[in-house]
Image (tube, rainbow, N blue to C red):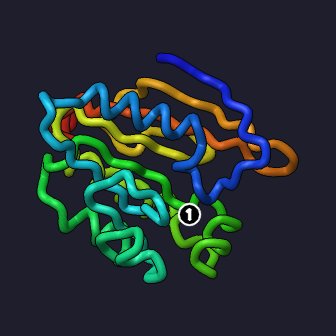
Amino acid sequence: MKIEIYNCLGHSSSDTHRLQAYDKMYSYARRAVGTQGWQLEIVDPFARKCMWGNKRNDINPKFLHDYTTHCMDAFDFLSALPRTSADIVLFDPPFSDRQSNEEYGTSNLYTNPAYMMDLGDEAFRILKPAGYLVKCGYNTNPPAKGFELVRVAICQMGACRNDILISLWQKVQMSLNVGLE
C-alpha cells in the first residue's frame, strides 16, 4: 500500500474533486480498470459539482441538470443501479456536520454510521469484480467487507480544519457473504 501526503492549505473541503490528491487517486483507478478504450462506468452518488462520473447524483436539487444526472437520496440512487455495472465508484459524502450544513442546510445528513455501511454495501454490489472505490473522508475505514485498501492520500488542510483522507479500495470478493456460510 502506498501513502502520499499533500499540502492542501487554502483549498475548500467541499470541492474535494479539485484537490490534486483526489485527482491522482481517480486517475490511478481509471488507468487500473482501463479496458481497451471502452467507456468506463463511473458512478458518483454525491457529485455536487464533480463531472467525472457518467452517472452523477446529489440530493441537492440545485445541482440537477448542470452537474448531475439524478437528484435523489444516495442509497436510493445506488439501489437503482444494476449489480456489477460500475468500474469505479466515487464515494465522497459530506462526512461532517459543517460540510452537511454548508452543502445541504442540515446537520447529520450522511453521518449516520449504519446508513454509511448500507451505502458501502450498495457500492460493493454495483462494482464489477476488481473495480475501484475512491473514498474521501476523515477515516480510512473500509466502505464494506470485500474491499482491499490499495492507496491512501493525506490532504493536510491546515488551521482548525480536519485533514482529508482519500483512500482507494479495490473490490476483491464477489460476495459480502464470503466466510459466513
Numbered circles on residues, count: 1
From the viewer's perspective, is 111 left or right of 123? Answer: right
Residue 100, above or below 177:
below
Q: Is residue 78 depicted above or below 143 in this figure?
A: below
Q: Residue at x 42, y 24 (%)?
A: 150
On the question of residue 181 being in view, the answer is: no
Task: Describe residue 121's horizontal placement relative to residue 117 as left or right.
Answer: left
Q: Is residue 162 above or below residue 23?
A: below
- Residue 127 in the image: above or below residue 5: below
Query: According to the image, label 1 marks what residue?
Result: 111
Q: Amino acid at mark 1?
A: Thr
Quadrant of the drawing holding the C terminus: top left
Residue at image location 47% in from the left, 25% down from the top: 151
Of helix, strand and loop, which one carries label 1? Answer: loop
Observer able to see residue 79: yes
Q: State the image coordinates of residue 132 (x, y, percent, origin top left).
A: 31, 36
Relative to the observer, which residue lies in front, 57 or 31?
31
Question: Which image quadrant for residue 133?
Answer: top left
Residue occupying the far right of the picture: 159
Report x, y in % for residue 129: 17, 34
Q: Return the x and y of residue 166 as percentages of the image width and height.
A: 54, 38
Which percent across, then down, holds residue 40?
20, 43
Residue that appears at 20% across and 51% down: 126
x 12%, y 58%: residue: 82
